[in-house]
Amino acid sequence: RLAELTQERGWQLYLVGGAVRDLLLADPEKTLLLTDIDLVVDGCHQSYNAVENNQQNDKNPPAVELASALQKTYSNARLDVHGQFQTAALLWHNDPVLDSLWIDIATARTEFYPYPAANPEVEASSIRQDLYRRDFTINALALRLTEPYQGELLDFFGGMNDLQNRQIRVLHANSFIEDPTRIYRAVRFAVRLGFELEFQTKDYIHYAINSGIYEKVQSENYSTQQRVPALETRLKSELKYILQAPYWKPALQLLGELKALRCIHPTLELNQELWRQIRLVDRGLIRFDPEKTLTHWQVRLEVLIAHLAPEYRGDVADTLQFTLDSIERLQQLESAKADVMKRMPECQLASQFYRLLAPYDLPMLILIAVQSPRWVRRRIWQYLTHWWTVKPLLNGNDLKQLGYKPSPKFKQMLDDLLVATLDKQICDRKSAEAFIK
Ligand code: ATP
């Protein structure tokens, strides 16, 4: 229907990006479920540019016009219009027929980078230029959905060949300088699809990293007129994608080999020590947070940032828009570690370990554990295994039933009960009641 609507207006419509790649890679024997579809309209520059230049024009931009027309047929879809460049999205959520589907419609556009790693400026253009602004040849294929030549595959940059040879290849030498987040995308696609980074593409990555990419990420906050998300936001979202994926370990390993963590901070290297910490964190999360109440990818990211010298941690976490409690944790990690190291040798009873460690939340304890000597780590694991969730054997209601009147003393009594429970002076209700009396 959308193709018909486009044709009626004399425009062309293309399926682009990941959907084309995934269709071409799909096993013909299996059903491929596309949930995120990118479409590009072409052949409508004049009407579009009139709108872009704020000239008098009572027409919607082409993408919005098409999406609105389609919504008349599919009234259960939500229509979102975003950005100054006016792309439109149609969203179906839990639809009985379409289930969850996201269709993005954009007008063919090209991007200019005012300086390396800047946010691109965007301008209307042809489908070829639209494809040329993309990250890799395998993501720069388009499938024509309108007549004539409906079903034609547009492959200007050798994407089909790279799909066959399982290669991730950029479209031009400056690609990673323009947008360092593409390094993370290259790694993500390589690991996810089981592809290789093409030889020269790898060289371009090395070149971009050696040219001081972190400074570029940092100098980003220039634009007040952002048409695409800021670079830090995109870097964070690529980190998130990678660290929450099932293949996060090999992806992180490859990022480490490429020295790509320097995009986060010039001193950040994936050395043996950091790997050891990451593996320990993973074990800690599996053991102590099996229900995944924590956001595991965020804890992994915190471990990476915690590996930086203390004076850099807060700023980097801030730049990457970590949550406030995460920033605070990273800022307090050194003093927490020092506190635990100093006081732990004096602890003998379970209740003493409890008093020392209970003020810290689980991610902080995991960070302290992986950055501390073995004897400290073992005690923290012991605390988390045996004592962390221990509660006093009686609660406030039980005390009331025993005839005690609610008073500030209640807290002290419950505290004493907890200590006695931890230190195994009491083991059941009866002994707890006797203890209170
Ligand atoms: P996925 O299956 O992971 O969603 P995708 O290819 O659909 O893969 P998106 O992040 O949704 O990935 O991006 C859609 C398309 O937009 C890509 O296929 C690519 O053509 C283009 N694109 C996305 N990010 C960039 C970027 N940083 N630089 C250039 N092109 C990009």
Image (tube, helix red, strand yellow):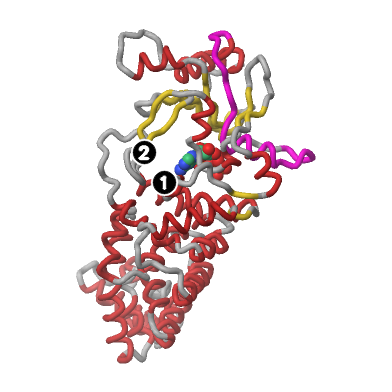
User: Considering the numbered disc 1 on the image, is that residue within a helix, a strand or a loop?
Assistant: loop
Residue labelled with disc 2:
113
Q: For this view, does 315 lie left or right of residue 30?
A: left
Residue at position x 60%, y 30% in the image: 142
Give the mark nearest the N terminus, 2 or 1: 2
Nearest the viewer among 246 and 213 is 213
Would you say residue 250 sits in the magenta stretch? no
> Quadrant of residue 267 in the image?
bottom left
Residue occupying image coordinates x 57% and y 21%: 13
The numbered dot on residue 326 is none
Which of the pair 391/130 is nearer the observer?
130
Q: Is residue 101 left or right of residue 121?
A: right
Give the residue type that dot 1 points to.
Asp
Nearer to the camera, 324 or 23: 23
Q: Which mark is residue 179?
A: 1
The span shown in magenta is 8-31
Question: Separation of disc 2 and disc 1 at Cα?
Answer: 9 Å
Please state which amino acid type lies under the numbered disc 2. Tyr
Question: What percent of the width, then of the height, locates residue 208?
Answer: 42, 54
**Which picture quadrant has residue 303?**
bottom left
CB atoms at circles 2 and 1 under 8 Å apart?
A: yes
Work out which quarter of the rendered image holds the N terminus and state it. top right
Q: Position of residue 293 (x, y in %)?
A: 46, 59
Question: For residue 269, which quarter of the picture?
Answer: bottom left
Mark 1 beta carbon near ligand 1 (under 8 Å): yes
